[in-house]
Image (cartoon, grey):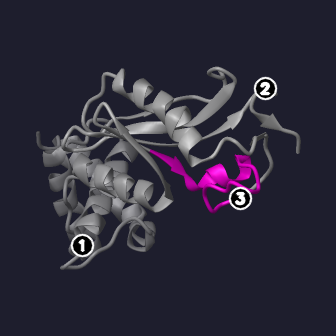
Amino acid sequence: MRLRQKDQKALKTYANSNRSRILTSPFLRTGIGRSYTQQEDNFREIQSFLKAIGVTTADDSRVKSATLIIEKEIGRTIEVLKPDPYNIVDNLIKIMKRDETDVELIKHEVKVNLDIDQLKHQHPRVPIGTRKKGGGTRFVETCDKDWHKANTLDHMADWANGLDMKIGEQIFHGQTIPVEGICYEGFCLMDKEGAKHVLFHCYPKYNTHELAM
């Protein structure tokens, strides 16, 4: 749907009044040959301009119409590309791979990994992970990689398997309510092929698994 005449006029006024801000926006890259990611950022920034003048439904056609108007007003070329949700999912998968440890379990076709933040909750003689910030309760020495696979990763696989999800959806486990004395902080993400990926760390809530700090 194209922009209404009054919205076109309002956008021209907005572009003229905010020309300097538009040209210096860190989220808008003018010129030809911009990357797909930058074009998607441009699309979102044009959407924000439309919302600023009261156009709440900034769909693909309206963004493209708005882009032509803004290009004319600021004298620059702006390439836009409607964001692909799959690109976001791919980026999240890359981040997950960066933050995962080699403690892995595949069950119910769900891939589960402990993350690098697990280190601060491990006994010093059985480290898992690399990043330690802040304090927290620790598991006892017997809670090693194999123990986690049989217990905490197994729980997360069962939890994720029971989730009704759609492609690109991310669901968090929640850590406030312990499960058999263990709090889980993590999430499940469904990739564009429909596979589920889980990344998490966990810590003991009660003395049954706890080592005094």
- The answer to whether 193 is drawn above or below residue 150 in the figure is below
Q: Work out which residue is located at the far right of the displayed protein and give it.
A: 213
What label does residue 206 carry, if any? 2
Q: Toward which corner of the image does residue 15 lie, by quadrant?
A: bottom left
Q: CA distance from mark 1 to mark 3?
A: 36 Å
What label does residue 132 carry, if any? 3
* Residue 135 relative to residue 80: left or right: right
Residue 172 visible, this orientation: no
Q: Amino acid at mark 3?
A: Lys
First in residue order: circle 3 vs circle 2: 3
Mark 2 burial class by Cα count in 10 Å: few <14, some 14-19, many 20+: some
What label does residue 135 carry, if any? none
Q: CA distance from mark 2 to mark 1?
A: 50 Å
* Residue 207 relative to residue 163: left or right: right
Q: Quadrant of the N terminus?
A: top left
Task: Evaluate if marks 2 and 1 touch, with contact meaning CB atoms under 8 Å apart.
Answer: no
Specify the segment rendered in magenta.
Answer: 113-131
Which percent across, then down, holds residue 38? 30, 68
Which percent across, then down, holds residue 107? 34, 34
